[in-house]
Amino acid sequence: MMTPNDRTASMGSGIRVPVIGQGTWHMGEHPAQRAAEVRALRLGLDRGMTLIDTAEMYGEGGAETVVGEAIAGHRDEVVLVSKVYPHNAGRKKAKTACERSLRRLGTDHLDVYLLHWRGSVPLSETVTAMEELRREGKIREWGVSNLDTGDMRELWELPDGRNCVTDQVLYHAGSRGIEHDLLPWCREHELPVMAYCPLAQGGRISRDLLGHPVMRRIADEHGATPAQVALAWAVRDGDVIAIPKATQEAHVRENAAALEVVLTPGELAELDTAFPPPDGKRRLDIM
């Protein structure tokens, strides 16, 4: 049986990550759900989803606290990613924000630290802050989130800007705008993309994606679920890392088993028809 750790992508100096990890958006917001969230993350680790993504924004630190409890005693098994608010991405504030995240997570370092989205702090200052945190051993690598192609080109021209190891963006079959220029640019520069909300994020968009007749039929043919087909689609080329969130143990098992689904060229073509790739530049989708 294939597990996420059987297919990995490279992220920086010697960091290998499973192509399906675990997201934590909306975790840590309700104390009554904390025990279930911790159990779900631990089950995900047991199933090979050893990449965990979180952020200081999620639950205003609550998600990081949940993650800290979940990884206690297992830190060496985990590739731990967190994100800094744009208003905390300056030199002094970034260090303070990172140290707060480390305390909540119960660790002395992050594997990857991301700028959550671009704000008023110049990218050059954020890069300087990230490089200082790296030299101090508080982070191993750094990256960005929600940056479009123009932002990435600007980043690439900065001193040390090419030390960025990932761009985390919204990506699923129903939101393919990055395929026009951002994803090709990242591939040209051997920069893996981390896809958040790879199953969409509830509501109508999720229903349109997972409830689509083509998605459901392909799932039935594989003895799988539409969510597993959607995840298999997202990681089909090996350089996109998906980080679905799950708080129910059944969904965790479902996500971990998605790599058992191998889509045929014919099925990929059917999904292209159902969810067409972009025919031009589109504004970067953000949740």
Image (cartoon, grey):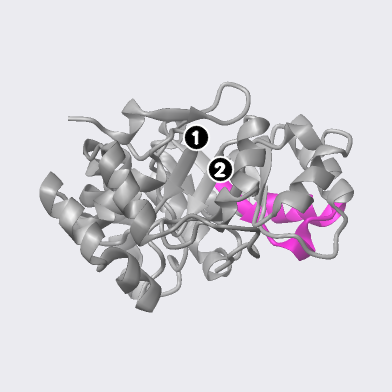
Residue 239 on image: x %, y %? 50, 35
Left or right: 109 as drawn, with respect to 172: right
- Residues at marks 1 and 2, CA–CA distance in whole angstroms: 7 Å
Disc 1 is placed on an element classified as loop
Residues at marks 1 and 2 touching, judged by CB atoms closer than 8 Å: yes
The residue shown at (43%, 35%) is 237
Amino acid type, mark 1: Asp
- Quarter of the image containing the C terminus? bottom right
The residue that label 2 is drawn on is: 193
The tag on residue 175 is none
Q: Amino acid at mark 2?
A: Val
> Residue drawn 72% across and 50% down?
149
Which residue matches tag 1? Answer: 239
For the point 62% across and 28% down, which residue is it? 12
Q: Position of residue 22 (x, y in %)?
A: 40, 49
On screen, residue 95 versus residue 243, left or right, reads right
Work out whether residue 190 or residue 39 is closer to the camera in this orientation and state it. 190
Does residue 121 sit above or below 191 in this rendering? below
Few, some or many residues within 10 Å of mark 2 (<14, 14–19, 20+):
many
Q: From which residue to which does the magenta span run?
A: 81-100
Residue pushed farthest bottom?
Answer: 204
Which tag, 1 or 2, sits closer to the chain's start?
2
The part of the image, by quadrant, that contains residue 226 is: bottom left
